[in-house]
Image (cartoon, rainbow, N blue to C red):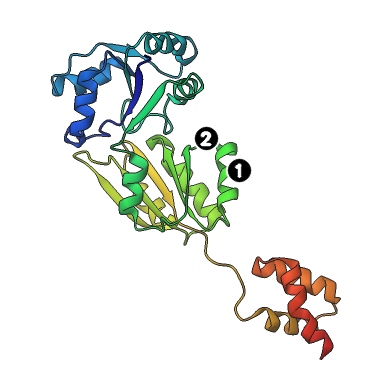
């Protein structure tokens, strides 16, 4: 029988966030694939785990994956961990998971800490629909292009950003998404100097311009405001008909765009007005 790959979440700061199940799995498997073995060794030592470690990161994924697959084919069970949080979420690992699935090797999630979910849970921004974009582009052009896509998006955006780029990032947000756009910034989650800022982009820029910025940062951008016009579709149709020289076809197209609904729905609404 083949072994099992356990995808194990580890603390993002506070070592006490390790689950009982995660400790047991890491003790029981034959090998732990870790993003940085030196970093992970501190965690294992804290819990008295002596399971052998092997490095598995973005620079050796291609060469290391076949080796790990061979071990699991021989019956060994492995655990995959990252430096912090849940593996495969803006971290290496998905290639190994994908190959396991293709080769009928069982993959089991051992859930736990995630900076993404931790930040969302305390940000006070809508969570019924959100988009996670991972680490923001390091280059200004790529970041601004991404922000332009966010400018009208009506859902919460979650991303990771480096502390030395946060100020330039916030300046771009103010310019592209507006000074009043809701934002939350979670810094050093679960650690001694944990901080949560909640306000708008202009306030965030003022707050973080006050001194040096350090630590791991999760940036959350609130949904864009509803830009749909006030009143009903029929009222909008009537107003355009009475105040412009636009044709009915042009009026229907404009109202559909303003309200964000299909042209066919607006056309049906316009039929009664045309008869009158």
Percent coordinates x, y for residue 157 in the rendering: 47, 49
Percent coordinates x, y for residue 125 in the rendering: 39, 57
Along the line of sight, the residue nearer the viewer: 244 or 228: 228
Q: Is residue 80 visible?
A: yes
Establish if 234 lies above or below 223: below
Q: CA distance from mark 2 to mark 1?
A: 10 Å
Using the rendered view, name the quadrant where residue 54 is placed.
top left
Task: Say the numbered circle drawn on residue 145.
Answer: 1
Say left or right for 243 vs 96.
Answer: right
Establish if 238 lies above or below 115: below
Q: Residues within 10 Å of mark 1 (few under 14, many from 20)?
A: few
Percent coordinates x, y for residue 13 in the rendering: 24, 34
Say left or right for 178 vs 208.
Answer: right
How many numbered discs, if any?
2
Residue ranking furthest to the front: 1
Residue bearing mark 2: 137
Task: Say the numbered circle drawn on residue 218.
Answer: none
């Amino acid at each position: 029988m083949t072994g099992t790959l356990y995808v194990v979440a580890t603390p993002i700061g506070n070592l006490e966030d390790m689950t009982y199940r995660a400790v047991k799995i890491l003790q029981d498997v034959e090998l732990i694939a870790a993003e940085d073995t030196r970093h992970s060794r501190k965690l294992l030592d804290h819990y008295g785990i002596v399971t052998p470690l092997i490095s598995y990161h973005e620079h050796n994924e291609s060469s290391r994956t076949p080796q790990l697959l061979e071990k699991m084919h021989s019956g060994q069970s492995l655990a995959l961990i990252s430096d912090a949080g849940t593996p495969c979420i803006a971290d290496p690992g998905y290639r190994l998971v994908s190959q396991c699935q293709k080769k009928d090797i069982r993959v089991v999630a051992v859930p736990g800490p995630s900076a993404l979910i931790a930040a969302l849970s305390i940000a006070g921004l809508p969570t019924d629909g959100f988009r996670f974009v991972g680490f923001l582009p390091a280059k200004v052009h790529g970041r601004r292009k991404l922000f332009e896509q966010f400018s009208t998006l009506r859902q919460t955006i979650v991303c990771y950003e480096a502390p030395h780029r946060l100020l330039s990032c916030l300046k771009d947000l103010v310019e592209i998404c507006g000074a009043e756009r809701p934002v939350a910034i979670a810094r050093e989650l679960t650690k001694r100097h944990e901080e949560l800022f909640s306000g708008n982009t202009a306030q965030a820029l003022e707050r973080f311009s006050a001194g040096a910025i350090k630590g791991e940062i999760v940036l959350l951008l609130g949904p864009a405001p509803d830009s749909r016009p006030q009143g009903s579709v029929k009222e909008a149709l009537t107003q355009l008909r009475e105040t412009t020289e636009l044709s009915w076809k042009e009026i229907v197209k404009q109202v559909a765009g303003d309200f964000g609904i299909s042209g066919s729905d607006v056309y049906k609404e316009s039929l009664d007005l045309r008869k009158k």
